[in-house]
């Protein structure tokens, strides 16, 4: 079968031959049940490339937005979603050391991860240290890189400071909170009440965003205001977060979850946040505002982007091995049950990463 012989079939179908690659396809703005699966030849690596036999990929908030057509720079439909993956190197192309074959690596791809075999540039693959399973490593690829870079590269939080993490029980928020605690930072975190005990066990002071006035409660817990706020909510929350900052504090906005189900322009919520950050940064009060985009530096300097990604993911893997952060796996489901996995992730009832396996 060549690349022109791809035939979408119902998601419940499974590949029957090991020589075939299996891909979950998002055909348009559809319900999870309308995801499709297609079979194709296992790709051949070109110069500087390698093929990863996927062992674990995840369901992140990005895929949830893409399903609704709300991710601000998603590709046109149809496409294979999947922001990241972990797997074994199956084959290498010219210019790539053959010794990589068989090694477990992780890759950040934005799309394409929901597949049994994924073609990537070898420079984008980061080796996973021994002692971590594929599922454990998967929980901290996009979530871990995002959390590490926002905490240490963007906000540059220091020991003894106090931060507010919105969605502290979520994928990025939970990793960020744990990394901050490991760095000697006091963490206040918003979450629904059912997650509060788990947050307390991590050393996080919880706020129930559904039942409490978050801004008022944060001021009670941190009378001197907070040194940094990490906000994925967007909308009005960004404004409240800005006003909670102490002099010299930093706001890091990295999403607009509150507009997930809105209609209209998918770029507008992000553009509004960017406009606010530009205005706020012009004020002479010492506070800074940033909109974090994990891909922002790639177009400007691809080599520097890759170096930072490799360095930061290596730091995150080391933190996972030390026990500074935990691999919180909510569920593991086979690739053919991507619809079920997506429903579970979107339900808001689970804590941790929903992981897909071959």
Image: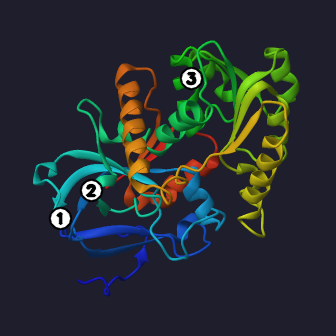
Residue 122's disc number: 2
Residue 15 visible in rendering: no
Residue under numbered circle 3: 180
Tell me the residue at 66%/64% (across/down). 70
Q: Is residue 90 left or right of residue 265?
A: left
Q: Eyeballing the image, is 175 above or below 237?
A: above
View extreme (bottom): residue = 4
Pointer 1 or 3: first along the chain = 1
Q: Eyeballing the image, is 157 above or below 139?
A: above
**Residue sitting nearer the eye, 23 or 324:** 324
Residue 66 in which image quadrant: bottom right
Between the C-alphas of marks 2 and 3, the distance is 31 Å
Q: Eyeballing the image, is 106 above or below 215?
A: below
Q: Position of residue 212 (x, y in %)?
A: 85, 28
Q: Position of residue 50 (x, y in %)?
A: 23, 60
Between the C-alphas of marks 1 and 3, the distance is 40 Å
Q: Is residue 249 left or right of residue 315?
A: right
Pointer 2 or 1: first along the chain = 1
Contact between labelled residues 1 and 2, with CB atoms less than 8 Å apart: yes
Of tags 2 and 3, the one toward the viewer is 2
Tell me the residue at 78%/33% (across/down). 209
Residue under numbered circle 1: 93
Tell me the residue at 76%/50% (across/down). 258
């Amino acid at each position: 079968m060549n690349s022109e012989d791809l035939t979408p079939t119902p998601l419940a179908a499974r590949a029957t031959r090991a020589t075939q690659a299996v891909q979950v396809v998002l055909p348009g703005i559809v319900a999870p049940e309308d995801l499709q699966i297609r079979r194709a030849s296992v790709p051949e690596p070109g110069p500087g490339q390698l093929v990863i036999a996927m062992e674990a990929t995840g369901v992140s908030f990005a895929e949830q937005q893409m399903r609704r057509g709300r991710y601000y720079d998603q590709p046109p439909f149809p496409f294979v979603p999947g922001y990241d993956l972990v797997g074994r190197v199956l084959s290498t192309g010219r210019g790539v050391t053959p010794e990589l074959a068989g090694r477990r690596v992780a890759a950040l791809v934005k799309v394409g991860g929901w597949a049994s075999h994924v073609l990537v540039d070898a420079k984008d693959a980061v080796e996973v240290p021994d002692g971590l399973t594929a599922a454990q490593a998967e929980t901290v690829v996009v979530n871990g890189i995002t959390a590490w870079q926002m905490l240490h590269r963007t906000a540059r939080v220091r020991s003894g400071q106090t931060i507010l993490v919105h969605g502290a029980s979520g994928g990025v928020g939970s990793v960020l909170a744990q990394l901050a605690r490991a760095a000697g930072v006091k963490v206040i975190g918003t979450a629904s009440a059912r997650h509060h005990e788990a947050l307390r066990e991590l050393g996080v002071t919880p706020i129930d965003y559904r039942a409490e006035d978050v801004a008022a409660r944060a001021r009670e817990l941190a009378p001197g205001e907070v040194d940094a706020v990490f906000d994925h909510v967007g909308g009005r929350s960004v404004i409240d977060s800005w006003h909670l900052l102490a002099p010299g504090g930093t706001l890091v906005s990295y999403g607009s979850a509150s507009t997930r189900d809105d209609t209209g322009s998918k770029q507008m919520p992000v553009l509004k946040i960017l406009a606010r950050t530009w205005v706020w940064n012009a004020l002479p009060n010492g506070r800074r505002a940033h909109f974090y985009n994990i891909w922002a530096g790639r177009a400007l300097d691809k080599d520097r982007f890759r170096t930072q990604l490799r360095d930061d993911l290596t730091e995150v893997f080391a933190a996972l091995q030390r026990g500074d952060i935990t691999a919180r796996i909510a569920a593991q489901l086979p690739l053919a049950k991507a619809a079920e996995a997506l429903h579970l992730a979107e339900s808001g009832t689970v804590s941790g990463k929903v992981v897909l396996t071959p």
